[in-house]
C-alpha cells in the first residue's frame, strides 16, 4: 500500500508541472506508467480530421512508435471509439477481446501482436471541435482489474488533475496561436504550426487561402505538400535541418510567372507545444514582381517627396519615363527632373540602381 501511495505522489508531483512552458514529459509518462502498472505509456493528439498530430511515448520501442505514426494510427480501435467519446471516457481493448472483436482487427493482428501488446487501456483527456487527445497504457499481459482501478480513488484524482491541466495548456496554446496569427497576418505573412514529421497542426486563415488557390503548395493527408517532387524534397530537407540544428532554414518556390512563395521554417515557441515534442513554425510570404512598392514607405525610407516616390514606384514597376509621364498626366520633362532628383538623393548613377533600391521594399 505504501509503495502504491508513493507511486501516486510521484505521478501527481510530475503532472503538476504540465502547465510549465516546457513540462517534464518523460517524468509525467514514467510516473503515470508506474502508478498504473503498465509496461509503457503514450500521450497522443489527433486533429479534427483524425490525423495524428503528436505522439510522445515512454517504454515503447522506436520501431513500435514508427509503425504507429506511419500507418497504424489509422486503424487504432480505441482511437476510433475515442472520436465519439467525451473527455473523461476510459477505453480498454480487453473489453473488445471479451466480445471477440479485437482479434479480428488489423490493429491487433499486425500491430499489437508484433509489439507484444496484450492490452491497451486509454483515457480520452480532451475532446473538442478541433482536436482530441488521450493517454494510453500498454501491457504485455491482460489485467482485468486495470479498467476499474484507474477510475477510483487516488487514480481518479490523478487523471482528473491531468485532464484539467492539459485543458489549461490547450487553452493557453490557442490564445498564443491567435496572437501569432494576428501579428504575422498584419504584415502579410501566413503561418502554420507543424510537427517534426511534417503534419500540419494549425494554420492561419491567410495560410488556408494560400494553400487552397492551386499555386503549388497544399495540405494533403494532413501534411504540407508540393506538386513538384524536387520542391517537396527541399521542404523535407529544410524541416529535417531545423529539427537537427534548431536554426531557421528557408526555401522559395514559384507560384506563377514573376511570383514566388518564400518559406521560413523554425522551431516554434515552447508555448505552442501541446504534448511532447517541439513543434515547427512555418512562415509563408508571397512576392510579386508586379506588386508596386508602397509610396509612403518609399518616402519614409529614402527621404524623397511623394511625387518622386510615385515616379520611383513607376520605374520599379517597369515603366519608362514616357509611360510614367502619361500615367501621371505630367510632362516628360517634369518626370526627367524628378528622376534626376532621385538619382541625386538616393546616391545612384543609373535608373537600374533606383529600381534595385526600390525593390528592397
Image (cartoon, rainbow, N blue to C red):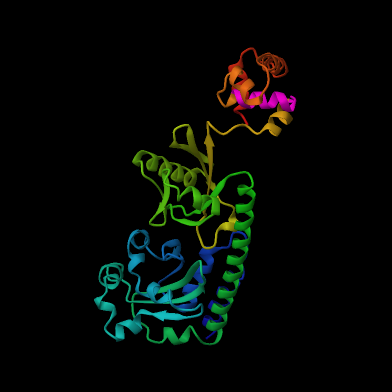
Query: Relative to 162, is 331 above or below?
Result: above
Q: Nearer the viewer, residue 80 or 110?
A: 80
Query: Relative to 70, is 213 above or below?
Result: above
Q: Is residue 15 left or right of residue 52?
A: right
Q: Residue 188 occupies which quadrant of the picture?
A: top right
Q: Nearer the viewer, residue 29 or 337?
A: 337
What is the magenta range?
303-315
Q: Nearer the viewer, residue 218 or 151?
A: 218
Seen at 38% across and 57% down, the residue is: 221
Dominant SS type (magenta):
helix
Seen at 47% across and 31% down, the residue is: 258
Q: Residue 233 occupies which quadrant of the picture?
A: top left
How many discs appear?
0
Where residue 271 appears, as percent x and y from the top left, is: 60, 58
Where residue 155 appears, as percent x and y from the top left, is: 53, 82
Q: Residue 248 occupies which quadrant of the picture?
A: top right
Residue 131 is a magenta residue: no
Q: Nearer the viewer, residue 35 or 253?
A: 253
Position of the C terminus by quadrant: top right
Where residue 223 appears, as percent x and y from the top left, is: 41, 53
Seen at 32% across and 76% down, the residue is: 118
Q: Is residue 333 left or right of residue 70?
A: right
Where residue 330 appears, as percent x and y from the top left, is: 68, 21
Amino acid at each position: 500500500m505504501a509503495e502504491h501511495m508513493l507511486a501516486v505522489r510521484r505521478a501527481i508531483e510530475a503532472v503538476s508541472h504540465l502547465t510549465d512552458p516546457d513540462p517534464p514529459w518523460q517524468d509525467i509518462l514514467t510516473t503515470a506508467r508506474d502508478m498504473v502498472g503498465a509496461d509503457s505509456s503514450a500521450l497522443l493528439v489527433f486533429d479534427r480530421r483524425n490525423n495524428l498530430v503528436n505522439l510522445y511515448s515512454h517504454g515503447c520501442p522506436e520501431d513500435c512508435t514508427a509503425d504507429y505514426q506511419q500507418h497504424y494510427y489509422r486503424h487504432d480501435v480505441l482511437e476510433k471509439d475515442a472520436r465519439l467519446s467525451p473527455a473523461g471516457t476510459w477505453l480498454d481493448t480487453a473489453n473488445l477481446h471479451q466480445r471477440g472483436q479485437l482479434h479480428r482487427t488489423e490493429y491487433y493482428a499486425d500491430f499489437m501482436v508484433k509489439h507484444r501488446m496484450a492490452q491497451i487501456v486509454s483515457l480520452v483527456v480532451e475532446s473538442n471541435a478541433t482536436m482530441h487527445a488521450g493517454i494510453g497504457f500498454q501491457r504485455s499481459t491482460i489485467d482485468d482489474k486495470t479498467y476499474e482501478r484507474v477510475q477510483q480513488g487516488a487514480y481518479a484524482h490523478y487523471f482528473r488533475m491531468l485532464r484539467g491541466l492539459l485543458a489549461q495548456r490547450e487553452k493557453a496554446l490557442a490564445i498564443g496561436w491567435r496572437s501569432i496569427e494576428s501579428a504575422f497576418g498584419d504584415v502579410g505573412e501566413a503561418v502554420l504550426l507543424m510537427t517534426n514529421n511534417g503534419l500540419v497542426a494549425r494554420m492561419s486563415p491567410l495560410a488556408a487561402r494560400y494553400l487552397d488557390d492551386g499555386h503549388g503548395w497544399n495540405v494533403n493527408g494532413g501534411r504540407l505538400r508540393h506538386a513538384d517532387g524536387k520542391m517537396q524534397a527541399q521542404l523535407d530537407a529544410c524541416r529535417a535541418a531545423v529539427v537537427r540544428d534548431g536554426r531557421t532554414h528557408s526555401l522559395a518556390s514559384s507560384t506563377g510567372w514573376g511570383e514566388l512563395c518564400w518559406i521560413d521554417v523554425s522551431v516554434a515557441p515552447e508555448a505552442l507545444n501541446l504534448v511532447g515534442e517541439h513543434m515547427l513554425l512555418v512562415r509563408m510570404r508571397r512576392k510579386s514582381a508586379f506588386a508596386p512598392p508602397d509610396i509612403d514607405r518609399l518616402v519614409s525610407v529614402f527621404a524623397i517627396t511623394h511625387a518622386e516616390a510615385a515616379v520611383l514606384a513607376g520605374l520599379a514597376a517597369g515603366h519608362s519615363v514616357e509611360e510614367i509621364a502619361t500615367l501621371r498626366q505630367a510632362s516628360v520633362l517634369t518626370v526627367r527632373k524628378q528622376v534626376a532628383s532621385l538619382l541625386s538623393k538616393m546616391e545612384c548613377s543609373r535608373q537600374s540602381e533606383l529600381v534595385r533600391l526600390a525593390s528592397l521594399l
